[in-house]
Image (spheres, grey):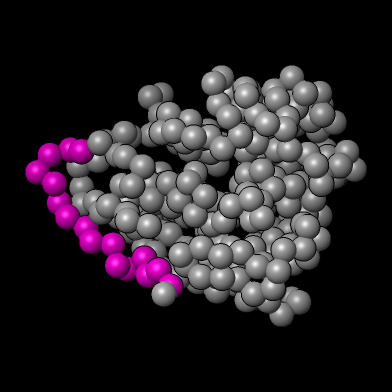
Amino acid sequence: MTFDPSSYVFSQPSEATAIRASTVLPARRENIEIHTEDGRTLVGELALPESGEISATLITLHPLPTHGGFMDSHVYRKASYRLPALAGVAVLRFNTRGTSSPRGTSDGQFEEGIGERHDVEAAVRFAVERGLPNRWLVGWSFGTELALMYGAVEPVASQVEGAILLSPPLHRATDAHLQLWAESGKPLTVLVPEHDDYLRPAAASARFSLVPQARVVGVDGAKHLWVGEKQAARVLNEIVDDVTRDGSGSAGLAQEWSGPAATATV
């Protein structure tokens, strides 16, 4: 059965409560379908602020689906739970071709990052057609490869402001792709865990030196999967600081919430 985001049950607590991993804050959420130029239908979810202007739009590209990556990978799930309410940020999540999650399964099969070019282009096109402003690619692990390979070339390059990379392995993305980013001049933030399995901060700084505008941030204590609330919150703060005018604030995004909230069970 396809998960329906309207099934969240919101209640008003009597006092401010801590925002936990499963806390869902109010947003306008809808299941979406994204159609690629090569005939695939991709399933996803769009979470928008309940009211007010949209400060930025995140187009998320998930980790490797053959190793458990999907649109619900925990950092992206928490982004969709929190950022519409805390920062006015729209969060677009979707399963790349052949990937399954509680939302459903996208058409096709995994294509080693090649056919997925159509997926990236289709997701960006969807955001443009929906009128979502200030669009940023956010890639995690395999998703960073897609952002690097396809984010600085048309038709995507002129439709996004820049990209934020979480734990880039730089396996499929090459120096040629980095050079394209350098030539684009678009902002590129690279969050690199201290204990990453593939690329650690010193090596990442050397590789990304090809992109003068790249900001490489080594994150102490973090691992490739950003496990734990402390690390997930750090990632969300960094993203909001980069993509919005007001940023996350001197103390970071709120850790308590006094309005209606729900608890996710999937």
Number of marks in the rendered image: 0
Q: Where is residue 221 in the image (x, y as percent from the top left)?
A: 54, 21
Which quarter of the picture shows residue 218? top right
Q: Position of residue 67 (x, y in %)?
A: 64, 50
* Towards the viewer: 69 or 34: 69
Image quadrant containing the C terminus: bottom left
Which quarter of the picture shows residue 140? top right
Vertically, is 43 above or below 61?
Answer: below
Magenta-drawn segment: 2-17
Residue 139 appears left or right of 118: left
Q: Which residue lies furthest to the right in this view?
A: 176
Residue 48 appears left or right of 257: right
Residue 215 in view, yes or no: no
Residue 205 in view, yes or no: yes
> Is residue 59 one of those drawn in magenta?
no
Vertically, is 155 above or below 138?
Answer: below
Image quadrant containing the N terminus: bottom left
> Is residue 5 one of those drawn in magenta?
yes
Residue found at x 85% / y 31%: 210
Residue found at x 55% / y 51%: 58
Q: Position of residue 145 (x, y in %)?
A: 74, 47
Residue found at x 62% / y 22%: 194
Residue found at x 41% / y 24%: 250
Vertically, is 204 above or below 115?
Answer: above
Q: Residue furthest front?
A: 67
Which quarter of the picture shows residue 115? bottom right
